[in-house]
Image: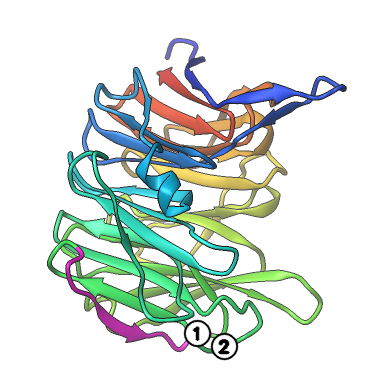
Amino acid sequence: MKEATLQSVYKAPHSVDDDNAVLCSPLTDMSFATDETGWAAGSGQVLLTRDGGQTWLNQFEPQLRRLGMAPWSARAVDANTCWLIGLLSPRDLYCCYTRDTGRSWKPKKFQPKFFPRDIFFAGSKRGWIVGDDGDYYSSRGRMLFITNDAGDSWDQVDLELAGRPTRLQFLKDGRRGWLIEQRLTASGNTISRLYSSTNGGLQWEQMVHFGRDISDLCVPDAQTLFVAGDDGFASRTTDGGQTWQRLNTRSRGFINSLQFYNKHLGLLLSDFGVLLLTQDGGETWQRISDKSKVGHLIAAVFLSKTRIVVASNRAIYNLEL
């Protein structure tokens, strides 16, 4: 494989302080619906690409600013549709969505005191939004909303979770799904649990308990799952969750995100510009980047086996393997 390097295609607005430290409006999420159409979100930024990440246009003005939206999560659904989670007031988290590639946005608020945490769509019609009541220490108000009509209507499912649901992912069939729950212990540490559903999210069963903060999961197929989180932790199952193997990432940083093209080829994205590549399902890892000036890496999308779009809190990059 040729040497892989990150090539910057977008830099978030920023300045430097007296110590030459970068002060910027950070990007926090990125999502692609097709090989050409993708979105990225952050403070004062809702970025759209229509050319596979080569160029990005800020769609934040003027409607989202009038709504008071401070977006931090984006979920691209199809070539025209994107859902955002963001802060609309000091107390509430809301959703907004567009179905015309950002020309207009509509707010979507669920029941009072519901704080969305993650959105996932399997196709353009079937989707899920998971959240809680905003109280980290409460065991109430954990809810999942399911739509079968692209978000026009949503059915509520109460989740019997002690902690906060943070991430979810489903297979294309819309029935097999996985959910991460985070919980603070009495000593102030974060632990995580992974749940699975076989009926589209109506019911959930605990799969495995992790005594640490798990930030993300990736599901290349029904039998293969990867999770990652703090202190360079990554783990894999190849039998649908019956057994788990910790992967030697040779990293101690916080892993913000992971993305796999298939069950062999994948990336781990960490703080301080650390980007790790595996081509053997996590058995070995190659360090592609470890430059702090890149920023904290937050998301990656495989557009092909060799072409990847990578986002940090400071910029968006193209990566050719």
The boundaries of the magenta stretch are 151-161
x, y (%) of residue 124? 15, 54
x, y (%) of residue 182? 58, 71
Tell me if I can see residue 61 in this picture.
yes
Q: Which mark is residue 161?
A: 1
C-alpha gap between disc 2 and disc 1: 6 Å
Give the residue drawn at x 45%, y 77%. Answer: 114
Mark 2, residue position: 139
Number of on-image labels: 2
Q: Are marks 2 and 1 in contact (CB under 8 Å)?
A: yes
User: Residue 253's quadrant in the figure?
Assistant: top right
Query: Which residue is nearer to you in this view: 87 or 242?
Result: 87
Badge 1 crowding class, 10 Å Cα cut-off, few under 14, some 14 to 19, many 20 or more, is some
Q: Disc 1 on helix, strand or loop?
A: loop
Q: Disc 2 on helix, strand or loop?
A: loop
x, y (%) of residue 278? 47, 34
Give the residue drawn at x 50%, y 55%. Answer: 216
User: Residue 49's quadrant in the figure?
Assistant: top left
- Lower position in the chain sequence, tag 2 or tag 1: 2
User: Residue 281's quadrant in the figure?
Assistant: top left
